[in-house]
Image (tube, rainbow, N blue to C red):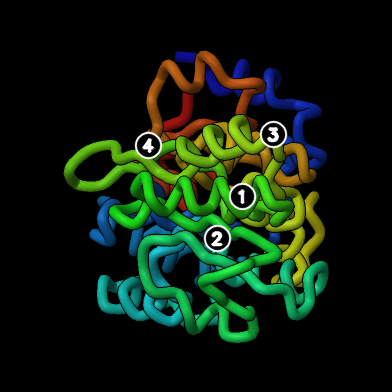
């Protein structure tokens, strides 16, 4: 494990706000693997989020979760004890809908996704045949050979490919599970196309979250369990990055990473202390 000093020095320069914790005014926080696993709160997460809010810091919960709407996510978190509402949640589907409205207004879209997110895609023209855009959400039983081959056919005929994220896997209480990024790689290779990614790690996703909070990147902190998609992507967008050792975190992923996080802590429960809001941070 790296020392606190080596983690900070290795991450310095990766994000414009690297190491400037005294100036932090807002937190972007991943949900799955950081606050919860399989929607159950991780130890200390509820109290830590309450402490952050009590200190007057703005918070946006940013997630690539594609199986639930923003309202459903907020409701589930509230019932688990987190003091959050729908406005606090920014999802890949919500950002995708905004992206389509801006860049492909009125386009016929074929959605391949596991879960009901219709409410967050209300303005998107979803179709079953002759789409102009193929939209990939999160993987599940719907990602079978027939569905993937159908999407492949549309891409061969000229449809554009938009992916809500590139996540290869995520952690549940049953262990790591494959996500749509694993299938996305195959579609891109087979159809010889490159997807537009709207969720994390796209810079536009982080910018959308910061815009909602009204805080510049240099005054914001991103907390995530995926070193590449959450933390290093945020650092490239100018935020300070904090990696937690919960959720999908694996030590070998950190060793293979394309860069170094600004900070690494055991869990979200340690973030208030990292920010000087309490005692007992465990960083290495």
Q: Earlier in the sequence, mark 4 or mark 2?
A: 2
Separation of disc 2 and disc 3 at Cα? 30 Å
Residue 22 visible at all = no
Q: Nearer the viewer, residue 191 or 239?
A: 191
Query: Which callout, 2 or 3, points to the residue nearer the camera?
Result: 3
Q: Residue at x 55, y 42 (%)?
A: 166
How far is mark 1 from mark 2, CA to CA? 9 Å
> How far across and how far down the image is residue 179, in percent?
40, 44
Whole-percent x and y of residue 65? 45, 59
Using the rendered view, name the quadrant where residue 102 is placed: bottom right
Looking at the image, is mark 3 or mark 4 nearer the viewer?
Answer: 3
**Residue positioned 74% across, 42% down in the render:** 20
Asked if the residue at tag 2 contacts the one at tag 1, i.e. Cβ–Cβ closer than 8 Å, the answer is yes
* Label drawn at residue 269: none
Residue occupied by mark 1: 200
**Residue 92 shown left or right of residue 98 in the figure:** left
Circle 2: element type: strand
Image mark for residue 62? 2
Separation (CA) of disc 3 from disc 4: 30 Å
């Amino acid at each position: 494990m790296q020392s606190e000093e080596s983690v900070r020095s290795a991450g310095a320069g990766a994000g414009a706000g690297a190491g400037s914790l005294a100036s932090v005014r807002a937190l972007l926080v991943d949900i799955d693997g950081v606050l919860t696993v399989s929607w159950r709160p991780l130890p200390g997460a509820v109290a830590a989020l309450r402490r952050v809010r009590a200190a007057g810091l703005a918070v946006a919960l940013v997630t690539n979760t594609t199986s639930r709407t923003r309202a459903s996510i907020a409701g589930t978190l509230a019932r688990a004890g987190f003091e959050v509402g729908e406005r606090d949640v920014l999802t890949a589907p919500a950002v995708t809908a905004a992206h389509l409205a801006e860049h492909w207004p009125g386009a016929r879209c074929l959605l391949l996704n596991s879960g009901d997110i219709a409410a967050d895609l209300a303005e998107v023209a979803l179709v079953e045949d002759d789409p102009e855009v193929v939209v990939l959400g999160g993987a599940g039983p719907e990602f079978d050979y027939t569905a993937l081959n159908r999407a492949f056919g549309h891409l061969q005929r000229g449809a554009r490919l938009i992916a809500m994220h590139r996540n290869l896997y995520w952690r549940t209480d049953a262990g790591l599970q494959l996500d749509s990024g694993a299938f996305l790689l195959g579609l891109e290779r087979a159809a010889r196309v490159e997807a537009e990614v709207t969720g994390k790690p796209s810079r536009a996703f982080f910018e959308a979250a910061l815009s909602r909070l009204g805080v510049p990147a240099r005054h914001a902190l991103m907390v995530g369990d995926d070193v590449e998609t959450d933390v290093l992507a945020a650092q490239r967008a100018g935020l300070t990055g904090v990696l937690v050792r919960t959720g999908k975190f694996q030590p070998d992923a950190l060793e293979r990473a394309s860069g170094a996080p600004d900070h690494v802590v055991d869990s979200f429960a340690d973030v208030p202390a990292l920010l000087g809001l309490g005692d007992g941070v465990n960083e290495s």
